[in-house]
Image (cartoon, grey):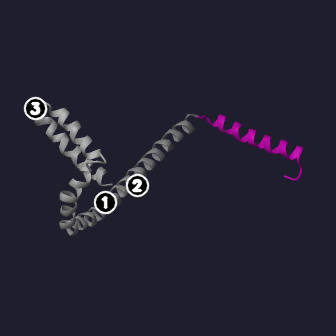
Amino acid sequence: MMYWIVFALFTTVETLTDLFMSWFPFYFELKIAFVIWLLSPYTKGSSVLYRKFVHPTLSNKEKEIDEYITQAKDRSYETMMRFGKRGLNLAATAAVTAASKGQGVLSEKLRSFSMQDLTLINDGEELGLRWKKYVNPWI
């Protein structure tokens, strides 16, 4: 675990140093040698760096870190509630808009029917009901 924490810090620092120091001779070779030193079970480079620098720093800043975590948790809950409300409002607005547009289309379709077409639909339904009663008298 110590290796991964030190390696994460190295990767973060590396992104900044690559911009400014990539012109330096043997820069990339030194980076490779440093990663090998971190990985090596004989040198235990990551353990040395963790115990000398990372662990004391984390121990000194433990209360501040805990406060930041609590603040982040509270803010994330508030943010999720805000986005959730916003999402529900958008979904409700979309549903109402779709329903109103759908109702308008349906009313336009119904207006396009003539009265004769509507009476044929009713007669057809009555015919279907009569046929069902003829086939099954218990309906």
Please name the amino acid that badge 2 sits on: Leu
Q: CA distance from mark 3 to mark 2?
A: 55 Å
The segment highlighted magenta reads: 113-139
Please name the amino acid that badge 3 sits on: Phe
**Which label lies toward us, 1 or 2?**
1
| Dot 1 or dot 3, earlier in sequence | 3
Asked if labels 2 and 3 touch by Cβ distance under 8 angstroms, the answer is no
Q: Main secondary structure of the magenta part?
A: helix
* SS for dot 1: helix
Quarter of the image that includes the N terminus:
bottom left
Residue indicated by mark 2: 88
| Dot 1 or dot 2, earlier in sequence | 1
**Which label lies toward us, 1 or 3?**
3
Residue indicated by mark 1: 76
Labelled disc at residue 1: none
Q: Position of residue 24 (x, y in %)?
A: 10, 32
Mark 2 surroundings within 10 Å by alpha-carbon count, few (fewer than 14), some (14 through 19), many (20 or more): few
81 left or right, relative to 59 = right
Q: Is residue 133 magenta?
A: yes
Which residue shows up at 86% across the image and 47% down it?
133
1 left or right, relative to 11 = right
Mark 3 surroundings within 10 Å by alpha-carbon count, few (fewer than 14), some (14 through 19), many (20 or more): few
Residue indicated by mark 3: 24
